[in-house]
Amino acid sequence: MDFRGKKYERGSNWSDPEVVELLQLWADESVQMELESCLRNQHVFNRIAEVLREKGIHRTGDQCREKIKKMKLEYRRIKDNSKAPRGGRTWKFYEVMDRVLTSRPALAYGSLGGSMMAQQVLQGSMVESYHHQFASSGLPFGHSQHPELMEIKCFSEPSMANSSRIQNVVPRPGFSALHRLRKKRKGQRVKDPLDDLLLKTLTSQRAMEERFLQMEERRFQRDLDVEERRMQLEQRRFELEREHEFRMFNVFAQMLSILKQSHSGSSSSLAMPRGLDFSQALSEIAGMGGGGGGDLQEMRARPLTERRVDMHGFCNTGDFQRSPYLSARGNIANVFRGSTEEGYKAYHADKYDEDKNPNGIINFGTSENKLCFDLMSKRISLGKRSKHSTVLRRLQEHLQLNKRTVILYQLTQTDMNLMEPPLLQYPDWKGHMFLREEVARFLTYYCKAPAPLKAENVIVLNGCGSLFSALATVLCDPGEAVLIATPFYGGITQSVFLYGNVKLVYAYLDSKITGTSTRPFQLTVEKLEKALQDARAEGVTVRALILLNPQNPLGDIYSLSELRDYLEFAKRHELHVIVDEIYMLSVFDESATFHSVLGMDRLPDPQRTHVMWGISKDFAVSGIRFGTLYTENQDVANAVGSLCYFHGVCGPVQHKVAQLLRDRDWINQVYLRANHARLKAAHTYVTDELKTLGVPFLNRNAGFFVWIDFRKYLRTGTFEEEMLLWRRFLDNKVLLSCGKAFECSEPGWFRIIFADKTHRLQLGMQRIRKVLEEREQEILAEEKEQPCQSDQDGKADSTDEVIFVSRHQEPTCAGSSNLGDLIGLLQQQMRSSDWLQKNTAEQFAQEKPEIYDVFSKLVGKQ
């Protein structure tokens, strides 16, 4: 894969066959003459890279040049140390490099049985045909009609397919006398000190010229970027003016309509509920027909009231028509669509099936665990066998019961299938007491609560979405807001807004590590404080804070100290805290530890702390709508309990869930072990594929998702480009979730769900790879004439936190970076680098004792 604009990529190791192909091209006489006859040789290596790509080796010209440079350094190091490489081992490419760099006769080496054999080989028609292929691939060096080539083939003794031999070609009898004379004179000039001084002068002059040209290219590109930015701002200003005019025209039209209906005596039909601002939101839907484009600065520059609603991002505004049969609230619900509705419709209309529809859409966008359906379906459908199964077999033997009677008896003895009369009647709307007691014991055990949790503090609803709606309704008045960090699970917006007209205030997180942050997208109290103060400055009342732990879509797990800081922040500002821990049992790596709020020794404000959990994620049963709320505030419990009348769970399902939660042996010994192992294997496969593609991603060990950075595949950093890429994936039959669905402030981030079967993961990643490769080729074709921004581009960095290919990172200069940014960057590099482990003081003292002695003396004088 070719990444223009990067000098090299860390971790792109060359295999022996790839090095053989590279040396075979680089050692060609015409290539050597071309490299010697020009000061700037980048185009030569670019042509070599093109020939390598035709042979199936995807390398850039910069990577080829860097590899040759490293091999030259290794050759000189060995030559200066009298051919004694590190560890006493012989470097397999030494003789080849020595022949090319000293113009010695061609030698060929093969490794057979540990011995070295030298042979001189003349290349015939194979050389001419290969040179013809090289020239036809766009690399016409033109200095030699029939250049000599070097062919190196790696093989082992047992298998000729893996054999290793190195064949070098001696000059032909008819080789150009002029070129041999030139080599002879070149060898004589190297011995002259004046020639050496002249060579250094020319090299320095060439480096200065290259540096000057690079600076000019960067200046020119900056000017282009500034002009493009100015045009974008001008276009944005024009669009805002049009939107404002359209909104004013809409208000004027509504006033005329109201006056007309008032005159006819029917104005009462348009009355809106007092205290609600659905009419305002409705006018925004009608007036704002644009898309949610723009970058981070434009988004944050918008007023909070506009950002919090952002209704045009969730409503079908293109063909919006206000229905006379609906209220203002009904009209909003009529046009409201979730952030994933379009993808859902396409997926259900063309769902992938291995046998019936192999060309259908593969769903990597819905957060479902599809790895453990086999375990859960058996456990929920039949349950555990009765302890009286032995007695049953004896009865069958002695009484010879018929088969139908045996099956009926077995079904009645399973712990899941029970239909007692109380389960068919109206329950306590908070849930049957036997279930609430079991939930309290379950949460006490798995949340590691310091004291047993109480059943009267447990409330049962049909899913956590209903819990968000109920809590938003009972904690906030219409028009008030809840604070949440972005990106976040987009379904929360629909849950809190549609019922209670409660809005969201965003604390924006981004991928840059600045200030007190130590990892990308880190939530800090400072960011919460800023978002809260900005909302209050605009007159918005914030009543609560939502925390997702583990976080969806990032996969972050908050530490105890972080949780305590968030809860203390909420206590200072008298905010309720809604903690969603629905993925608490889906932490699949032993190195990561989950800390529940219910496991804390002391809550800063227990009357304003409310914890949610459900079985849909941790137990792979998203079709069973079951969620629980634990709160010590009885007023909140009673208020939410009143809404349970609309969100209750049927009795048979409550019985099944109670039996499931009670069976702790099966959960610990069977289900969780299998679930964690399967999640870890699927996560490893997807992340390895992303590393192979060179795609940055956030590396976490919880949940079913990976947060991926596709920003380099966007032509411009806008959400319109993000949506085009999302549709490109959907057209290629793979459904992902784009960052806009999670209110991410940086366009280009996507969420992929990896909790799926292996064959679907493989096929889905193949389709993703195809889209990315096509997209990359298109972008490269468009940028072919643009100057290379090699200095501004970062280099690939693979760490435990995040893999960055930071071509979208803005260059950091000393004048614009502050001390906090530098410290944060230094901390990240120290955590991610293993240089200190590989380079110890003892090792340095052994390798360079003279320098170590001088350093020790200097340290002793301090």
Image (tube, helix red, strand yellow):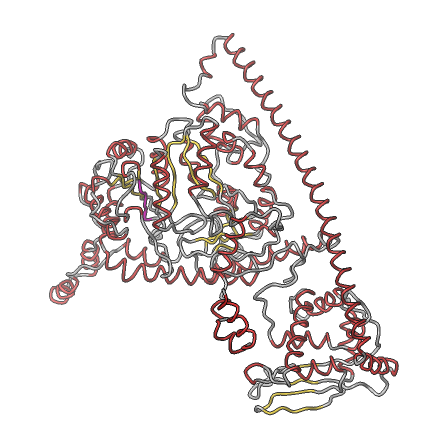
**78 relative position to 655: left or right:** right
Which residue is rendered at x = 65% and y = 69% of the image? Answer: 56
Is residue 153 visible in this depiction of the protein? no
Q: Residue 314, position in %: x, y?
A: 50, 35
Region in magenta: 610-615
Pick the front one: 708 or 290: 708
Residue at (36%, 37%) from the top-left corner? Answer: 570
Name the main secondary structure of what is drawn in magenta.
Answer: strand
Q: Is residue 730 left or right of residue 18?
A: left
- What is the number of callouts on the image? 0
Residue 369 position, x and y percent, is 39, 54
Question: Relative to residue 356, is residue 19 drawn left or right?
Answer: right
> Can residue 531 be seen?
yes
Q: Is residue 239 magenta?
A: no
Position of the N terminus, as image quadrant, is: bottom right
Q: Residue at x 51, y 7 (%)?
A: 263
Q: Is residue 807 above or below residue 28?
A: above
- Closest to the observer, 74 or 502: 74
In the image, residue 517 lies at what x, y percent?
A: 47, 49
Residue 527 in the image: above or below residue 3: above
**Placement of 837 over or under 287, stated as above or below:** below
Where 264 falls versus 558 (above or below)?
above
